[in-house]
Image (cartoon, grey):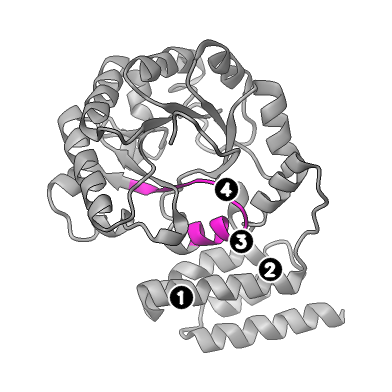
Amino acid sequence: MAENFFCKVMLAPMAGEGDYTFRASCKKFGADYLVSEMISAKAICYNDKKTPMLAKIRTEEMPIALQLFGSEPEYMARAASFLIEEAEKAGTPCAAIDINMGCPVQKVVKNGEGSALMKNPLIAGKIISAVKNACGETPVTVKMRLGWDAANINVEEMAKIAEESGASAVCIHARTREQLYSPGVDISHIARVKATLSIPVIGNGDIFSAEDALHMFRETGCDAVAVARGALGNPYIFEEIKAELEGKSYTPPTPRERIEEALRETKMRIEDKGEYTGLRESRTHIAHFTKSLKGSAAIRGKINFLNTFGEVEEVLLAYADALETE
């Protein structure tokens, strides 16, 4: 699938945010391709009971890649093989195995994983090769950053290693690990990678609107864009980008539509995870949906103390009514 990367607009992986409910919402509003939350290769190999849930694929979210993180080629290869086999047995094969070389959080990089692999090209190449050999016909893609810090930007070298090691596509987040998620990206490096690779290059970083996506396409020549934080509370961004690409008009959602979508997602998350977990995990997503609306801070404060979906629904629908009468 990645060799003929058909999508123009995809959802990037987001640990702690990109669960099934969120992914399904992005798919509903036009995301062509999805990527799962990060899955620990060692957790898979050591039979962790909770980790396989991160790799569960539902038919309605296909095509979707499963993203693995780790620092040891053997574990990464074993985990990739296991995930592919389990997905095929379930009748929902994954579109690709995506290797995480971009996560910047300390608990990941301290183990030499995620963006720490940008400091170790030799190991990174061995991981990609090992995973490719274990994946058979399933494509392997790689998500990476520009480098470890401003003094060590090596994305062109790493992207070339990925291609030579068998990767079918690379997704580049246009920040260094040191920058974390601070404002500002340098997409000139994506343009340079695109000019030297024969495999598809996906641009990522600070895509919060259709104009941001078009700017990424224009300035880098990338084959696709990956939206991450820009989709939080705004799954409509995929419709917006695709409308712009197709020269069609786009009408943003009304406040009521945003609130109703937040409720729909909350109900779906509760059905998937149970009311206690689903409701608590939905609080952050509700905050994203309402943050730009008048009086939303007070509403979020109320919701954080509610314990049932019925209570949340009552508060949010009353809030929607109030917004319409102002």
Q: Nearer the viewer, residue 313 or 95?
A: 95
As measured in the structure, the alpha-carbon distance from the residue carrying label 1 to the one carrying label 3 is: 15 Å
Q: Residue at x 38, y 78 (%)?
A: 276
**Comparing marks 1 and 2, which lies closer to the viewer?**
2
Amino acid of disc 3: His
Kind of element beneath mark 2: helix
Dot 2 or dot 4, earlier in sequence: 4
Residue 306: x %, y % from top left: 51, 83
Q: Nearer the viewer, residue 13 or 104?
A: 13
Residue 257: x %, y % from top left: 71, 71
Q: Which residue is mark 2?
A: 258
Q: Which residue is mark 1?
A: 279
Residue 259 sits in which quadrant? bottom right
Kind of element beneath mark 4: helix
Kind of element beneath mark 1: helix
Amino acid of disc 4: Arg
Dot 3 or dot 4, earlier in sequence: 4
User: Where is 155 relative to 318, above or below?
Assistant: above
Q: Residues within 10 Å of mark 2 (few under 14, many from 20)?
A: many
As measured in the structure, the alpha-carbon distance from the residue carrying label 2 to the one carrying label 4 is: 17 Å
Read off the magenta span. 22-38
